[in-house]
Each structure stands twice: as structure tokens, then as C-alpha cells.
Amino acid sequence: MVRLTRWLTDVRQRVAQAAAAGQQAAPPDGDPALQPDGAPRPLGEATTPGKAPGPGPVPPPPAEAPAPRAPDGHPVPRVVRDAAEWSWRLIIIAAAVAGVGWLAWELRVVIFPLVAGLLLAAGLQPLVRRLRMAGWARGPAAAVVFVGFLLVVVGSLTLVGNAVGGQFEDVVDQAEEGLQEIRDWLAGPPFSIDEAQLDSYIDRAVALFQDDSSVTEQAATAATVAIEILVGLALALFALIFFLYDGERIWTWLVRLFPARARARAAAAGDVAWLTLGQYIRGTVLVALFDAVAITVLLFILQVPLALPLGVLVFFGAFVPLIGAFVTGTVAVLVALVTQGLLIAIVVLAGLIVVQQIESNIFQPFILGRMVRIHPLAVAVAVAIGTLAGSIIGAIIAVPIIALVNTVGSYLASTRERPPPVASG
């Protein structure tokens, strides 16, 4: 009996061990990703039932079929709707720009002097900054730069006035002789215009621009323009003082008008715009100096009277890009014509064209092209639009506006805020 009992106990233990081994061989809950011993199955091992495990690629999950798009039942095609949305937005932008331009023109007695003071401040601000870096206080630095600017301008005008006064009588005498030579030239072939016909043509030309009924109106208009110029000049100088003295705090106050989240970008964009404006003014001054010096030297070589005043006139005319120096240079051609004759006038005209070509193709791209990156076509279009909208003043401020829009727009586009990343999990 004892042996029988031991044998049954041994059989029971073997049956229990066999059952335990069978449970370990089968994956729990039928999971094919586990090995028989419960460890994770290596990636790529075959798990097909009835097939020996072995290496092999894992089949990709089945791709989900794209959801069918709902049919667009709108009667207007999508392209036409997009074009309409772009159109009305562009119309609103154009209307806003036109409204701002109309308001600026109506308030030109105030707006244009402020713009002139801002342009002058952009060119003179580096001098104030250097004095402040040297230890000067803000007030004395701004005052010294402002007074120095006035001395340079007044001194230049005084020099020009003395030159004109000293040569005025000689120029008048030479002009009378030159006009008589022109009359003699027109009386000969191929024109054959006698003095009586020429006087008749001159009288008709004068009658087109002036008659007895409009003399009073023209005098009133001239007086109004003179008053506007004097008021604008005083306002521009007054604004220049405070732009040099308190420009940083004025801009800080303007930045506070922006929403809090946009103040940092607005301040940075303003710094970029101010840097661009200063570079444009300094580059334009260098180009104007080149034109004025070249024309003045040419007139001195040809012994044309009023060479220095004509050079100063070319300098101020060069602030209108592309055409300013050439238009004011034609005055020098006319002076050479009536004082030195046709041949000298042709030489002055040829020299003026050469100087303009050197400026447009070499000097201006080298100076302004590196300081303010604006395409020449954009400059030409801006000058044309500015001339049509605001005559000479519009032509002067058109290119700086285009430069500011280009620089600020590029800066804002490059620093556009990106959306925050979506948190995983």
C-alpha cells in the first residue's frame, strides 16, 4: 500500500508539471506578439498560426480610403469667388490709401513741413548721436547740430547771392547779345523768320499765359503761395528742433498707442524704418554732391557765367531722383546758350547727359543700391506717381515712402509670429 501511494503521488506531480508546461507554451489571451516564454516577440518574426516562426517584414497597416468630398453646389465657380474676394479687398486697400493721400494733400501746409523736418532729422541724427556718445547732453548736442545746419544753409545761400549779384550785369549784357544772335540765326535759312514775325510769336505766347483779367488772381495766388512757403519753412525748422532733441521719446509715446502684444514688433520695425530713412538721405546727399560738383567744374572750364549758383541749383534739384538734376541742369544749358553761343550750349548739354549717365548707372546704384535696395523701375514709377499726386514735393517724398514700405514690409514678413506647437499626448 505504501508503494502504491508513492506511485500515485509521483503520477500526480508529473501531471501537474505537464499542465504547467502547457500553459507556458501558449501565449496568454492569444497574443501573437509574445513568445512562448512570455517575452516580447522580435520585430519581423512570423506569427501566422500553423506556421513556424521565422524572420520576415511586418506588413504595413491598411491605408484608410480618403473620405469623399462633398459636391460644391455653389452656382459660381470657385475661381471666380476667389477673384471677387481679392478684388474687394484690393479696392478697400486702394480706397484707404487714396483717403490718406487726399487728407495729406488737404493738410499739406502742416503735413509736408513735418515730413521735411523728419527727413532732415534722419540725416542729422547721426551727428547728434556722436556728440552724445562723446559725453554731450541731449539739449546741447541737438542745439549745436541745428545751429550748424542753419549756418551751412545760410552761408551757401549768401555765397550764391554774392556770386549772382557780382555777375548779374555781365550776364544781362551777354544775354542780350546771345538773344540777338538767336534772332539772327532764326532769320536765316532754314527758318527765315524775320524780327516782326518773331515778336508776334512772343506776344502770342505771353498772351496764352497772361491776360488783363487774370493779373489780380495771379497776384493773389502768388501771395498765398509765398505765405504757405514761409509758414511751412517755420514749421519745418520748429519740428526739426524737437525731432533732434526729443525724437526717441516721441517715438516711444507713439509705440504705446499700439496693442501691448504688438509693441515690441512695432518698435523694432520703427528702428529699421529710421535706419533706412537715414541711409536714403545720406545717399541722396552724396549723389546730389556728385552732380553739383561735376556740373560746376564743367561750367567753370567752359567759362559759363553763374557757374556756382547753377551748381547749387543742380544740387537741390538732384533730390528729385532720376529727373531732378537733368531738369535743373537745362537752366545751365540755357544760360550757356544766351551767353556763350550754340556750340558751348551743346557741349554743356552733352556734359550734362554724361554726368546723368554716370550717376544713374554707376554712382547711384553703388550708393543708394547698397543703402536702400530699391529697383530702378520702382523708383521711376514712384517718382511719376508722386509728381502727378503732389508735384515737386510728391516727387521728393515718393521714393523715401517706397523705401520705408519695402523695408518695413520685408522685416514684418520675416519676423511673422509662428503658431505655438501643439502639445503631444
Image (spheres, rainbow, N blue to C red):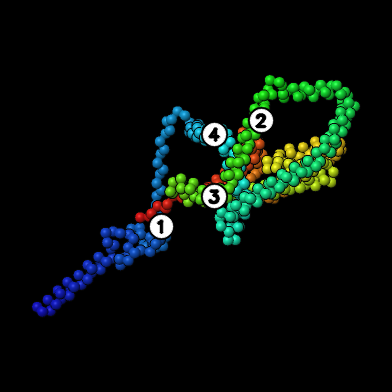
Q: Is residue 351 left or right of residue 263?
A: right
Q: Is residue 180 above or below residue 304?
A: above
- Distance (Cα) linking label 1 and label 2: 92 Å
- Distance (Cα) linking label 3 and label 4: 24 Å
Name of the residue lying farthest toward the bottom: 2
Report the front residue among 421 and 90. Answer: 90
Residue picked out by circle 1: 58
- At x 34%, y 64%, the residue is 40
Q: Residues within 10 Å of mark 4 (few under 14, many from 20)?
A: few
Label number found at residue 222: 2
x and y percent of residue 96 in the render? 52, 35
Q: Amino acid at mark 3?
A: Gly
- Distance (Cα) linking label 2 and label 4: 23 Å
Of helix, strand and loop, which one carries label 2? helix
Q: Residues within 10 Å of mark 3 (few under 14, many from 20)?
A: some
Residue 161 visible, this orientation: yes
Q: Is residue 327 left or right of residue 117?
A: right
Q: Is residue 165 above or below residue 147?
A: above
The answer to whether mark 4 and mark 1 are in CB contact below 8 A is: no
- At x 63%, y 45%, the residue is 374
Q: Quadrant of the C terminus?
A: bottom left
Q: Amino acid at mark 4?
A: Leu
* Mark before the other along the chain sequence, 1 or 2: 1
Of helix, strand and loop, which one carries label 1? loop
* Mark before the other along the chain sequence, 4 or 1: 1
Residue picked out by circle 3: 247
Label number found at residue 103: 4
Q: Amino acid at mark 2?
A: Ala
